[in-house]
Amino acid sequence: MQQRRIPAVFMRGGTANAVVFHQKDLPADRRLWDDIFLAAIGSPDPYGRQLDGMGGGFTAVSKVCVIGPPTRPDADIDYTFAQIPVKEQRVEYAANCGNMSAAMGPFAVDEGLVQMQDANGEALVRIHNTNTKKIIHARFPLVNGCAAVEGALEIPGIAGTGAPVRLDFVTPGGAATGKLLPTGNVRDTLDVPGVGKIAVSMIDAANPCVFVRARDVGLSGTEPPAEVEANAAVMQKFAAIRCAASVAMGITRDVHEAATRLTNPSIGYVSLPQDCALSSGVALRGEEIDITGRMIARGQAHRDMPLTRALCMAVAARIVGTVVHEMSRATDNPDTELRIGMPAGVITAAAEVRLKDGAWVAERGSFMRTQRRLFEGSVLVRNSLAALIA
């Protein structure tokens, strides 16, 4: 055999796909993981299609997850997430993927890593995400001891329905920087070369984000993602703002380093609730949402909404004074779910945020997803990597 087999499962979590490995099937030396992941996914691919691997040519389907025994007493499993750039020969571990987090609890139960007493009850799996050092509680129904797949929950961007997985991110603040408000302010003014002075809110919850008003970068906030990506001037503005925010948040030392580290922060642009056409062609009415939100992640206009960024947006919406709070529909109940209008539809996220002793604290962020195991067996990699896997 000219290739080596590695046991793996291919799963969908929310609006993402990933190859999922058991940690025990990978080398103990984690420095050897990158080459294996790149080979499995099919990166780098100058053609941008990843046809020689399991990737699908864009960030939402170019991912790897590794599940192992817990290294914390308040967790049932450890979960390490790897983002694989399509055209670059590197692997990024700086952030978590909220969508794939939805598949980790079901994977752990179905693989026998976590035992449940009631085979037809509700499972609770406590997940330790090693990227952010945060705990996520996953709750989902069981059928004959396995994670349920069939259900009535429909999520934008995925055809059909599935069984619900509720994800609760416990104390999500400071996932990357150690602080919910990395600069100490709910709103800052950045002086960005090529852009000028612009009001931003820099929030670190689940994953760090910098938020701007859509109108401040020359957008209405409802343009299709492809149209935004085709607007070179706007994309250059976003890139410059993201780099300036990265330095201001303490993620990178300077804008040159920030330009090479695309994972964090992501940039979100928000506007008031408004009518728009969804990617499916369906019309979304402004009265159905609480805010219009879009994300730029890794230099691409996202086709839906990354879950951890949706959570960060929901947290920001509950912090008085942020640009996200300014653009959000007013509510008397800060624990009400935030309905975010994004390109594929409406995503809801709840955030418990409190002002304690003069400081904002994010206690919890929650949302619902579906998941499904798509393929199980082995991933094949060339024998040139055999020494790494042995």
Image (cartoon, rainbow, N blue to C red):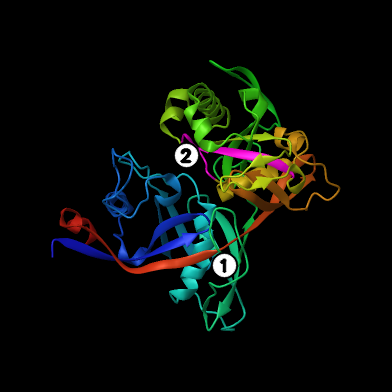
Q: Position of residue 151 (x, y in %)?
A: 60, 71
Q: Position of residue 82 (x, y in %)?
A: 41, 50
Q: Quadrant of the C terminus?
A: bottom left
Q: Quadrant of the N terminus?
A: bottom left
Does dot 2 land on a helix, a strand or a loop?
A: loop
Q: Are marks 2 and 1 in contact (CB under 8 Å)?
A: no
Pick out the residue farthest to the right: 332
The amino acid type, in three-letter code, at marker 2 is: Thr
Residue at position x 62%, y 47% from top?
A: 310
Residue at position x 43%, y 34% from top?
A: 261
Q: Position of residue 331 (x, y in %)?
A: 83, 46
- Between disc 2 and disc 1, the foreground one is 1
Q: On screen, 258 above or below 357?
A: above
* Residue position marked by numbered label 2 in the rendering: 263
Q: Does residue 296 show up magenta in the picture?
A: yes
* Residue position marked by numbered label 1 in the rendering: 162
Answer few, some or many: residues within 10 Å of disc 2's Cα (few below 14, many 20 plus, some between 14 and 19): some
Q: Nearer the viewer, residue 328 or 49?
A: 49
Q: Which residues are magenta?
A: 290-303
